Image (cartoon, helix red, strand yellow):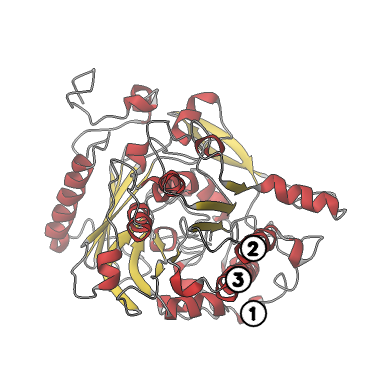
């Protein structure tokens, strides 16, 4: 799914009242990693991390790109020097089908990397709508708001739709893009040749903003019945001030709780709709007799603030944005019992996990590890920390790095001189930063040290001990410039 908050699912233990019967049933058959985090709270970087097993700072895919001038574009594109696990499966003889949001932009494109793969994209849906007589694939935006941002170190601005833009589509639910993709995926499963191995990837669009939806999902939830989490429409001391005036996350700062409640009603309808779409794919696997033999993994690229901390969309390391669900249903022949894991997991672990179960070689240089041992042996300790990074949305902005370990989360904002520290066990909604509390100095120093060590181990081009200003993006004009400062292959030889 895309933008699905982890706390919308019953597996999170929270009760928001949203109906997700198919994902609830999948969680009951799966090993659920309760402490899974995205590689980056942004679509293209984190989806590329899923596909390659590389952190964004090593794959070079730092941003989404696409709406700004050309200098940003290389940093939203995967270079030919990096491979995906998709290619590993195809080369091993798997029939590969991808339906839905693709978001791995690469040189050369995936269609050329895997000429025999079946890749279904937006254009297929647009043709379907035209054939049914619908004039437009998406409702027109009646108004937009200015969004202040940065473009490769320089102040900039773009126009975008506000969160209140939640229209009803003019077509029925069966014609909505996720239902279209789900139905197409299900049909391909039902007609698949069982004598060869298959890989089906279904990447839903919902509940991505703008929150436009068809009936019955548009009217499914009454705003008056929604009990909002306590941090909605609340600003907390300790948040970086740039959260209030930089990028897409600022578009909801004007809304109060009642304004957000109306938006939540449309969002929850989309969550139920994407659950139904996923259920159709699951049912096709069961009807075709593939379910017991299948490795099934459910996750998403990142979450959605939806008013938490008075913010909108993703792009932060807060729980609503960075904490993701991760369900792994192994093949029935494997010695795994459904249950929960408290060890940390993340998107860079998915490529090696898929390849491990498929018995194929994962892409070279991967920085994750297969989750299969932890899936099949609950006694293994697993990883004791998760890491998160961010560099900007459409162009490079203010970078961020974060670590979650034990009960604490530490966030470092480059170029601002701002740190945050939260006890997410005692303060799960991250309302009080402890970074300036002397009694937490030891924890802050320990997490700072661990984050710095991870950045150096994974060859991050930034360093916690080196100052960073927005103009420093000029040092990294090409993907090839993303080298650790002062490293042997850094031509400048200096931070």
Q: Residues within 10 Å of mark 2 (few under 14, many from 20)?
A: few
Work out whether residue 347 can be spotted. yes
**In x, y percent, where is residue 52?**
38, 45
Please state, as top left, top right, bottom left or bottom right, where the C terminus lies in the image. top left
Q: Nearer the viewer, residue 85 or 169?
A: 85
Q: On the rendered structure, is 83 left or right of 67?
A: left
Residue shown at the point (48%, 44%) measured from the top left? 44
Residue shown at the point (64%, 40%) measured from the top left? 159
Marks 1 and 2, Cα distance to the nearest angstrom? 45 Å
Which residue is denoted by mark 3 in the rendering?
284
Q: On the rendered structure, is 234 left or right of 121?
A: left
Marks 1 and 3, Cα distance to the nearest angstrom? 36 Å
Q: Is residue 34 above or below residue 110?
A: below
Which of the two discs, 1 and 3, labels the residue nearer the N terminus?
Answer: 1
Q: Residues within 10 Å of mark 3 (few under 14, many from 20)?
A: many
**In x, y percent, where is residue 197?**
48, 58
Which of the two discs, 2 and 3, labels the residue nearer the N terminus?
Answer: 2
Front label number (1 vs 2): 2
Which residue is denoted by mark 2 in the rendering?
191
**In x, y percent, where is residue 180?**
70, 60
Q: Are marks 1 and 2 in contact (CB under 8 Å)?
A: no
Work out whether residue 142 can be spotted. no
Which element is circle 2 on?
loop
Which residue is denoted by mark 1 in the rendering?
224
Q: Nearer the viewer, residue 88 or 82?
A: 88
Residue shown at the point (36%, 59%) measured from the top left? 37
Q: What residue occupies the far left of the structure in this picture?
A: 442
Q: Residues within 10 Å of mark 1 (few under 14, many from 20)?
A: few
Which element is circle 1 on?
helix
Q: Is residue 466 above or below residue 311?
A: above
Residue shown at the point (46%, 57%) measured from the top left? 302
């Amino acid at each position: 799914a895309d933008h699905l908050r982890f706390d919308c699912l019953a597996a999170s233990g929270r009760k928001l009242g949203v109906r997700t019967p198919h994902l609830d049933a999948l969680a009951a058959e799966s090993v659920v990693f309760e402490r899974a985090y995205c590689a980056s709270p942004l679509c293209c970087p984190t989806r590329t991390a899923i596909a390659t097993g590389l952190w964004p700072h090593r794959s070079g895919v730092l941003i989404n790109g696409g709406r700004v001038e050309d200098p940003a574009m290389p940093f939203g594109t995967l270079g030919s020097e990096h491979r995906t696990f998709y290619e590993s499966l195809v080369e091993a003889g798997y029939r590969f089908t991808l339906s839905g949001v693709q978001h791995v932009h690469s040189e050369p494109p995936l269609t050329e990397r895997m000429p025999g793969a079946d890749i279904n994209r937006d254009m297929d849906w647009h043709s379907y709508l035209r054939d049914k007589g619908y004039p437009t694939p998406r409702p027109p935006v009646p108004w937009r708001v200015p969004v202040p941002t940065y473009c490769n170190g320089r102040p900039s601005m773009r126009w975008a739709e506000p969160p209140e833009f939640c229209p009803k589509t003019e077509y029925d639910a069966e014609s909505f893009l996720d239902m279209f993709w789900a139905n197409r995926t299900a049909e391909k499963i039902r007609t698949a040749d069982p004598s060869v191995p298959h890989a089906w990837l279904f990447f839903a669009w919902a509940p991505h903003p703008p929150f436009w939806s068809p009936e019955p999902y548009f009217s499914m939830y009454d705003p008056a019945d929604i009990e909002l989490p306590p941090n909605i429409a609340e600003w907390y001391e300790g948040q970086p001030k740039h959260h209030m005036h930089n990028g897409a996350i600022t578009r909801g700062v004007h809304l109060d709780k009642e304004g957000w409640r109306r938006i939540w009603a449309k969002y929850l309808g989309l969550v139920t709709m994407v659950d139904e779409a996923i259920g159709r794919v699951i049912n096709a696997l069961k009807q075709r007799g593939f379910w017991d033999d299948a490795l099934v993994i459910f996750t998403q690229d990142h979450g959605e603030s939806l008013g938490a901390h008075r913010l909108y969309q993703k792009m932060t390391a807060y729980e609503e944005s960075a904490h993701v669900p991760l369900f792994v249903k192994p093949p029935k022949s494997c010695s795994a019992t459904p249950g929960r894991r408290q060890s940390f997991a993340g998107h860079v672990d998915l490529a090696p996990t898929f390849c491990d179960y498929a018995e194929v070689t994962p892409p070279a240089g991967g920085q994750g590890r297969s989750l299969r041992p932890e899936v099949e042996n609950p006694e293994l300790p697993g990883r004791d920390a998760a890491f998160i990074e961010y560099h900007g949305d459409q162009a490079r902005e203010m970078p961020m790095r974060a670590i979650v370990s034990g009960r604490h989360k530490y966030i470092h904002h480059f170029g601002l001189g701002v740190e945050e520290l939260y006890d997410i066990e005692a303060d799960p909604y991250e309302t009080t930063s402890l970074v300036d509390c002397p009694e937490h100095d030891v924890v802050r120093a320990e997490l700072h040290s661990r984050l710095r060590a991870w950045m150096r181990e994974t060859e991050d081009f930034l360093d916690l001990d080196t100052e960073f200003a927005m103009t420093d993006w000029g040092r990294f004009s090409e993907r090839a410039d993303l080298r650790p400062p002062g490293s042997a292959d850094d031509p400048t030889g200096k931070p």
